[in-house]
Image (spheres, rainbow, N blue to C red):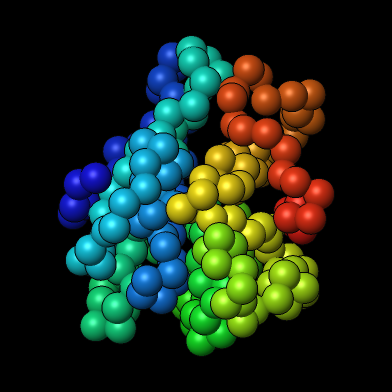
Amino acid sequence: MAQALGAPCPGGAPGQPRVFKLVLLGSNSVGKSSLALRYVKNDFKSILPTVGCAFFTKELGSGAASMRLEIWDTAGQEKYHSICHLYFRGADAALLVYDITKKDSFRKAQQWLQDLEREAPPGDVVVMLVGNKTDIEEQREVTFQEGKEFAESKQLLFMEASAKLSYQVTEVFGAIARELLQREERKKGQPRTGDGGLALGGAPARQARCCAR
């Protein structure tokens, strides 16, 4: 993990992976960095609060079928809120993360969505709502149905996950990757017949299946 100061380099050159910018948004301590670290390095550990923004990359597939996710993990503390808006620019996708054991983090995820929509018109960015920390289900304050209904009302993808237990983390990022590729093909007017050999992770479990965009 490295602190990120600049913008990601553009991709798309022949033989190079297609590059997509993914921003992680949410309040402090919801587990944004833990989700990114689990996905990129399959690791979980106590992480200090992100200062400004941290940067991860993950390459999927190989050759002409490859893609690279450039993951921008924004700080959740209120004092960095205005700075984080800079990282919305040029984003292809966003994960709105909340802690299922903290109702306030769910409300703040909705505020982050409003901030994102001010920077980019709805539909321009692939957005997934993620309820993290299912490993402490006994402390749950936000039901699965609440998250699902809000996501459906805003036409967002939706899943629950646990970075600690590595539950559905690969599926979260894989669903985003698939949606990005499908959107790119729709723009070209070419129907997709598959993922071109990309290893994007298995399908979500039935209970936590993504809401359709």
* Residue 7 appears left or right of 41: left
Kindly identify the residue that appears in the image at 62 percent across and 43 percent down. 171
Q: Which residue is nearer to you in this view: 127 or 147?
A: 147
Residue at point 36%, 56% (across, down): 33
Q: Is residue 198 above or below residue 34?
A: above
Q: Position of residue 189 (x, y in %)?
A: 74, 34
- 72 vs 19, nearest the viewer: 72
- Quarter of the image where the N terminus is located: top left
Q: Position of residue 108 (x, y in %)?
A: 49, 82
Q: List x then y, in percent, for residue 180.
A: 60, 42
10 or 81, nearer to the observer? 81
Task: Tell whether 160 sits left or right of 149.
Answer: left
Residue at 53% over, 64% down: 133
Is residue 105 visible in the rendered structure shown here? yes
Q: Residue furthest front?
A: 138
Horizontal arrangement in the rendering, residue 5 relative to residue 176 (left or right): left
